[in-house]
Amino acid sequence: MTRAAPLSFVYVLGCSDRHGIRTYVGWTNDIGKRLRRHNSGKGARSTRGRSWRLLYVEYFSSRRDAMQREYFLKRERGFRKKLSAGISLMTPIA
């Protein structure tokens, strides 16, 4: 019996702080664990010290496909701007 490969996820996070609205794109095999790491200050350097909200997730059957999509979304500023349109500058994300 072969073990199924774990799903890979590409995600977009958003936050609002005194500098404005920010987004972050990443990939992982465990989206819940990764979001907790970002919000605890142990994620990527650019996400530390902020409270992040999950804005978007895509699922992939391979790590390679997820990493390719992440690379594309990191350069797709218009898409990320549309996703973050619902984030208010006046209301901190909890």
Image: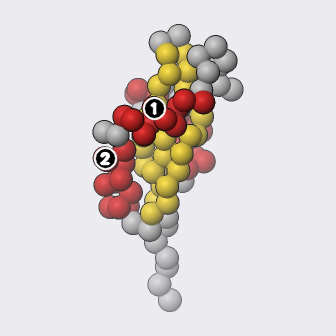
Structural crowding at the residue carrying mark 2, measured as other residues with C-alpha within 10 Å and reported as few (<14), some (14–19) or many (≥20): some
Is label 2 in a helix, a strand or a loop?
helix
Position of 17 compared to 78: left or right?
A: right
Q: Are marks 2 and 1 in contact (CB under 8 Å)?
A: no
Amino acid type assigned to the residue bearing label 1 in the image: Lys
- Tell me residue 92's x, y (percent): 65, 19
**In this figure, which colouring scheme has been used for the structure?**
secondary structure
Residue 43 seen in the figure: no
Q: Nearer the viewer, residue 83 or 56?
A: 83
Label of residue 10 in the image? none
Position of 80 compared to 84: left or right?
A: left
Q: Is residue 83 above or below residue 5?
A: above
- Tell me residue 53's x, y (percent): 60, 34
| Residue at image point 44% right, 36% down | 80
Name the residue at the top extreme: 18
Q: Is residue 31 above or below residue 18?
A: below
Position of 5 compared to 68: left or right?
A: right
Q: Nearer the viewer, residue 35 or 20?
A: 20
Q: Quadrant of residue 26?
A: top left
Q: Quadrant of residue 67?
A: bottom left
Q: CA distance from mark 2 to mark 1?
A: 16 Å
- Tell me residue 54's x, y (percent): 58, 40
- Which residue corresponds to mark 1? 81
- Tell me residue 25's x, y (percent): 42, 40
Amino acid type assigned to the residue bearing label 2 in the image: Tyr
Is label 1 in a helix, a strand or a loop?
helix
- Which residue corresponds to mark 2? 71
Position of 54 compared to 28: left or right?
A: right
| Residue at image point 49% right, 79% down | 3
Q: Quadrant of residue 88?
A: top right
